[in-house]
Each structure stands twice: as C-alpha cells, then as structure tokens.
Image (cartoon, rainbow, N blue to C red):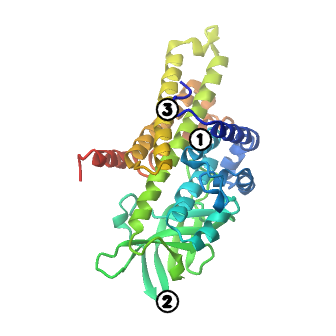
C-alpha cells in the first residue's frame, strides 16, 4: 500500500523524492526543534533548498525552474513535512500561492522580474488575500485600490500571510477591490514589492504551530504602485484568487500527508521499542489496530492528493479534487498526530521529542486554505447541491 499503479512515480520523481528526503533528514531534522522553540525562520536552509532546485520544481526551465510539474511538487512538500511542517509550508506557499499566479497570469516582464529569482530560491513571494474579517469569502474583503496621479493606491489590512516579512521576501500579491468602470468594485490583484512606501509588514504572530515559518499581518496605507503592478486583467482578480486557492489546497493536502506519514513512523518505531507486560506494545491489538488504520488512511490521502496534483498538471479542472484531498488529508493528519501522542504516552507530552511539535503543527491544516466546513460546502457546490 505504498503506491498505486495509477500514480506510480516516475524515475525522476523518485530520484527527487530521495534527494529531498536525504536533505530533510540530514539538514533539517537535527535543527527543527531548535527553530521551533526559538520561532526562528531558517533562512540558510531555504537558500540551500533553492540551490537544490526545490523552489523551482514546478516552474518551466525558461524561468529558472526544473519543469517537473505539480505531482513532483506534491512529493517535495510531502517529504519536507515528514520532517518539519514549517519548512514545508514556507516552500509550498512560495511556489503554489506566490509563484504560480505570476506564472499563470503575469506578463513576460513580471515573470522575469519576480518568478525567475523565486524559482532559483533567491527570493520568496507571498499572496495576501485573507483579512481579519474575510477569508474564503473574498467578497467580504475591505482592502481597496484606487487610481491616483497615475498610480494605484492600496489601503487595507491582510492577516495570516506567509513569507512576507523575512529577509528573503521580495514581493506580495495583494487582492483589492477596484473601480474598473462600474459600481460593483470587482477584485483585482497587484504585485507590491517589499519596501514599497505604505506597505508595512507587522511583527510575526506568536503561533501554536508552524513556529519556524514567517506568518504576519500586513498593513497597506496609501501604498502606491504603478500600472505595471497589476497581475492579470483589471477587475479579474477573482480568477487569480480561485486559481491560487485550488493550488494552495493541493499544497496543504501534501503537507498533511507528510506530517501524517512522519507521525506514523514515529509512533511505529516507538511501539516496537516500548515494552509492556513483557512484550513490545506494537503486539497489542489496541496499538497495532491504530497503526494499521493510520497507514490505510494515509495511503488514501496520498492518492487523493496525487490525483488532484495530476489533474492540475494536466491543465484539467481540479477544484473538487483539491477540496476533497485537503479535507480528508488534513483530518487524517490531525488524527495521526493525536494517535502518535497517545501511543507515546507521557513521553509524547515532553518537548524533547518531535511528537508535540507534530501535534501542534497538525491542527492548522484543517483551517488554512479553507476550513473543513468550507471545503464541504465547496464539494457540495461542485455536486450541484447548493448555489
């Protein structure tokens, strides 16, 4: 149950997986606990991942990438999350929700300026849509952009934004309501370079999980950008947003699979070593049943994730598949983290092991890029059950 004939990895994908696994185990695992405890963003490791080609896996070679596609990207993110979800979400957000829209909707000039260094791992990008009072319901967003003296002036606040305030941060894509000739104030998207006057990243959040990733609030106050900052067509930002959302959900599903796999491996290893009543606890039905159930659920989550990634890579619709993969995989990840802690018993409650970190990192997976409740609505809408 480690693979499916339908989604058998290619030789290139397996080689990439093995390279990332070796790097994660050698360069990330020894430091993940310290980064987590210190809430430290590991800039050097992100640069190393760039040198490995990881940050450009899904992008064409002409823009500095490997041209390996969405399935390869899911494999990469899964392997990183198997060791450290903070690194995985940094990479996933950079590629799927910052680089992807530039590739899909950007001009050639925008791709050369923003995507090429991002694909090489020299810079990081961010996508800012969520606000303190608006998440998946982008229509409730309050950020605006209006024309003034030949520029677009942005005002508003964005919340829970990844990769916008560290030393590698280069740009943020901002959704804002614009007056595009009507009264509806449709959504548009703008690329705002880091350091632009009026764009102020706030202090990093003190988070329960993903502590080594960069997440913060962004404030825009009379932030002026030129016409060349518009990403895609004016007034067509909803299309950009929905594309980012679907791709981001595949990314979160891959992180979920990786975290769940890592938790299962930790729990299995401990169950084989921990003795109770003269035998390893793995021999007890109560324990091996948990592990068998998790292995089965993770295999199913992986197939859902690869399926959504494969549809994305083929240029086919994948909204429902992305929602289903993210919904199922994130809830499997939470269960795997809980069972891992349960099997470890008291030792799982001690921060000296990775078990509590995986437990803390798991819950946000059912929230980010659409809560489980929202995803059920998305699936129901795709089924024609709701408007």
- Cβ atoms under marks 1 and 3 closer than 8 Å: no
Is 193 drawn above or below residue 21 in the view shown?
below
Could you tell me residue 349's position as x and y percent? 60, 33
**Disc 1 on helix, strand or loop?**
helix
For label 1, the residue is: 75
Is 56 drawn above or below residue 337 in the view shown?
below
Question: Mark 2 packing: few (<14 Cα in 10 Å), some, or many (20+)?
Answer: few
- Cβ atoms under marks 1 and 2 closer than 8 Å: no
Q: Residue at x 69, y 44 (%)?
A: 32
Is 259 drawn above or below residue 150 in the view shown?
above
Could you tell me residue 320's position as x and y percent? 37, 46
**Disc 3 on helix, strand or loop?**
loop
Q: Earlier in the sequence, mark 1 or mark 2?
A: 1
Residue furthest out toward the top: 278
Q: Between label 2 and label 3, give the one nearer the viewer.
A: 3
Q: Which circle marks residue 150 in the picture?
A: 2
Marks 2 and 3, how far apart at CA = 53 Å
Q: Earlier in the sequence, mark 2 or mark 3?
A: 3
For label 3, the residue is: 6
Q: Is residue 183 left or right of residue 260?
A: left
Q: Nearer the viewer, residue 315 or 190?
A: 315
């Amino acid at each position: 149950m480690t693979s499916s004939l339908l989604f058998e990895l290619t030789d290139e994908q397996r080689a990439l997986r093995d390279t990332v696994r070796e790097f994660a185990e050698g360069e990330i695992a020894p430091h993940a606990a310290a980064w987590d405890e210190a809430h430290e963003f590991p800039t050097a490791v992100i640069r190393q991942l760039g040198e490995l080609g990881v940050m450009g896996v899904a992008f064409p070679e002409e823009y500095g990438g490997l041209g390996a596609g969405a399935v390869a990207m899911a494999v990469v993110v899964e392997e990183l999350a198997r060791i450290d979800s903070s690194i995985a979400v940094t990479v996933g957000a950079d590629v799927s929700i910052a680089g992807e829209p530039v590739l899909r909707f950007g001009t050639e000039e925008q791709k050369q300026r923003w995507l090429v260094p991002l694909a090489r791992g020299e810079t990081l990008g961010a996508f800012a849509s969520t606000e303190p009072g608006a998440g998946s319901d982008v229509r409730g967003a309050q950020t605006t952009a209006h024309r003034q003296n030949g520029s677009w002036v942005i005002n508003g606040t964005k919340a829970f934004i990844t990769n916008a305030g560290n030393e590698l941060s280069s740009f943020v894509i901002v959704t804002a309501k614009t007056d595009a000739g009507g009264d509806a104030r449709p959504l548009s998207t703008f690329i705002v370079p880091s350091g632009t006057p009026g764009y102020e990243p706030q202090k990093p959040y003190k988070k329960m999980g993903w502590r080594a990733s960069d997440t913060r609030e962004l404030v825009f106050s009379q932030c002026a950008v030129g016409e060349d900052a518009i990403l895609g067509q004016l007034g067509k930002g909803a299309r950009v947003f929905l594309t980012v959302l679907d791709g981001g959900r595949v990314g979160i599903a891959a992180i979920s699979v990786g975290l769940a796999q890592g938790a299962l491996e930790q729990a299995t290893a401990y169950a084989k070593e921990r003795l109770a009543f003269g035998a390893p606890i793995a021999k007890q039905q109560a324990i091996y049943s948990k592990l068998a159930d998790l292995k089965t659920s993770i295999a199913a989550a992986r197939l859902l994730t690869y399926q959504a990634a494969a549809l994305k890579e083929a240029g086919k619709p994948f909204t429902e598949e992305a929602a289903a993969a993210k919904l199922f995989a994130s809830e499997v990840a939470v269960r795997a983290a809980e069972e891992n802690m349960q099997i470890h018993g008291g030792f799982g409650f001690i921060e000296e092991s990775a078990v509590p970190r995986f437990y803390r990192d798991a819950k946000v997976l059912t929230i980010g890029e659409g809560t489980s409740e929202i995803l059920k609505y998305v699936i129901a809408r795709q089924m024609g059950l709701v408007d």
